[in-house]
Image (spheres, rainbow, N blue to C red):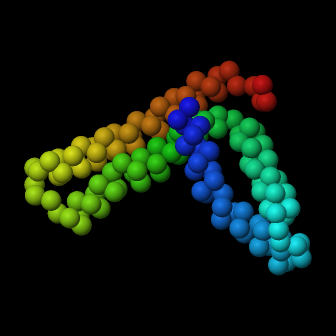
Amino acid sequence: MMVVIHVIGSYQIFAMPVFDMMETILVKKLRFPPGLALRLIARTTYVAFTTFVAITIPFFGGLLGFFGGFAFAPTTYFLPCIMWLAIYKPKRFSLSWFTNWVCIVLGVILMILSPIGALRQIILSAKTYQFYS
């Protein structure tokens, strides 16, 4: 359930530049009148297209976990901790120093294990895969 909530929220964030680009092209190049109807039609078409692509691409969930392990874990777990340690330079072996290092180690472990687990899931799913079933 939490993965679904995360994907819905992140889809909105990453789709906004595409929505803006599509609407700009439709208004400036193709002379569509700007407004609610344009937004509704353009965005619904884009969401329907990306949904179709997600359904068409086999093992979409496994691929999401595979690539998310490389991108999500570093940017969420250990890169902010590394930046915080570099900026604030806390006293060595203090509580904040130790907590940040625990997050860094756990983030690196997650970054390594998540793609491995997703790849395993893709391989297991490939054994019984049938297109659009």
Identity of the residue drawn at 78% across and 43% down: 52
Q: In this view, does 89 lie to the left or right of 125?
A: left
Hey, which residue is sitting farthest top in the picture? 128
Q: Can residue 99 be seen in this view?
A: yes
Identity of the residue drawn at 40% across and 50% down: 76
Residue 109 vs 101, above or below: the answer is above
Q: Is residue 31 left or right of residue 61?
A: right
Q: Can residue 119 be seen in this view?
A: no
Q: Quadrant of the N terminus?
A: top right
Q: Residue 122 in the image: x percent, y percent?
A: 58, 31
* Viewer-nearest residue: 127 or 6: 6
Q: Residue 96 in the image: x percent, y percent?
A: 18, 51
Hey, which residue is sitting farthest front in the picture? 36
Identity of the residue drawn at 89% across and 76% down: 31
Q: Quadrant of the C terminus?
A: top right
Residue 118 vs 70, above or below: the answer is above
Q: Residue 71 in the image: x percent, y percent?
A: 47, 51
Q: Residue 115 in the image: x percent, y percent?
A: 47, 39
* Viewer-nearest residue: 110 or 25: 25
Residue 130 vs 48, above or below: the answer is above
